[in-house]
Amino acid sequence: MGKLLKTKRSGILEPAVGSPVLLTTACFLFLTGIFCGVFTALLLPQSEKGSLLHYLNLGLLPDANAPAPGETFLHSLLNNLGLLLLIALLGLTIFGFPVAFAALAYKGMALGLSSVLILESMSLLKGSAAVFASLIPQNLLCIPAFVLAAAAAASLDMDILRHRKVGIKKALAQRAGDFLLLILFLGIVIAAGCCIESFISPFLLQLSK
């Protein structure tokens, strides 16, 4: 039974991990996005930093202006599943995987930018605690999911282009099923990350203060 479950899990992830080169590329682009976000935050004018910090503080400060956990969950779910759906659609368009990689880099840039802004708005110790409490827990699930989705989208497109002699539509029909199954699985993982962000991270944030 355990062997069967292991085989099933590896089968679900196969569209993403089947090409180590594409998976490595996805990881590299995400890390590049983080570094770009860090440098962007350092170069932003103070006025723009203030408006961005106000938005971030809505989720960091336990006051009357802070959104309810249910509202935070819905907002996070729509944003993250929207990005996952975009990556999936780009993969199914055959030539859209470069934009899927760009979306992954954008996600990394947003994470790097947010981290630096939080660190700059607090002391080093409190800022680090806030970053680890508010950004890290959910992204331990969400970021691998986005990396796997982008790698799978690129792998699907490459595979279809290699087999285009049998017809792109036929090749897509034969290979899209495994890709969509992976996207569904990653959507569940991302939803779990959104739950952590909405219901667990605020509690961790309070403990860190």
Image (tube, helix red, strand yellow):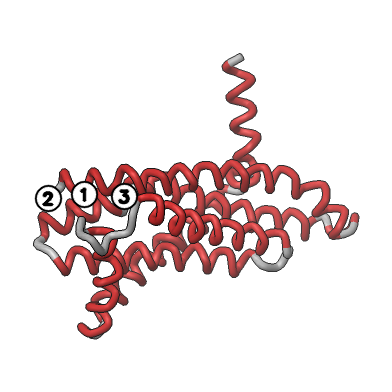
Can you give x and y, in whole percent of width and height, for residue 67 in the image?
32, 59
Amino acid type at circle 3 is Ile
Q: Residue furthest right?
A: 166
Secondary structure, mark 3, is: helix
Contact, mark 1 vs mark 3 (Cβ under 8 Å): no
Using the numbered discs, state the Cα–Cα distance from disc 1 to disc 3 in whole angstroms: 11 Å
Question: Residue 68 appears at what percent x and percent y?
Answer: 33, 54
> Is there any visible trace of residue 36 in the rendered image?
yes
Q: Is residue 195 left or right of residue 132?
A: right
Numbered disc 2: secondary structure:
loop
Category of crowding for the residue at label 2, using alpha-carbon neighbours closer than 10 angstroms: few (below 14), some (14–19), many (at least 20): few
Residue at image location 55% in from the left, 45% down from the top: 186
Q: Amino acid at mark 1?
A: Leu
Q: Secondary structure at mark 1?
A: helix
What residue did someone put label 3 on? 136
Q: Residue at x 16, y 68 (%)?
A: 121
Residue 5's disc is none
Is the residue under label 1 in contact with that under label 2 (CB below 8 Å)?
A: yes
Q: Which mark is residue 209?
A: 2
Give the mark nearer the N terminus: 1 vs 3. Answer: 3
Q: Is residue 135 left or right of residue 92?
A: left
Residue furthest front in the image: 64
Q: CA distance from mark 2 to mark 1?
A: 7 Å
The answer to which of marks 3 and 2 sits earlier in the sequence is 3
Asked if one can make out residue 21 in the rendered structure from this viewpoint, the answer is no
Report the front residue among 39 and 90: 90
Q: As displayed, is residue 48 above or below residue 75?
A: below
**Residue at position x 73%, y 64% in the image:** 93
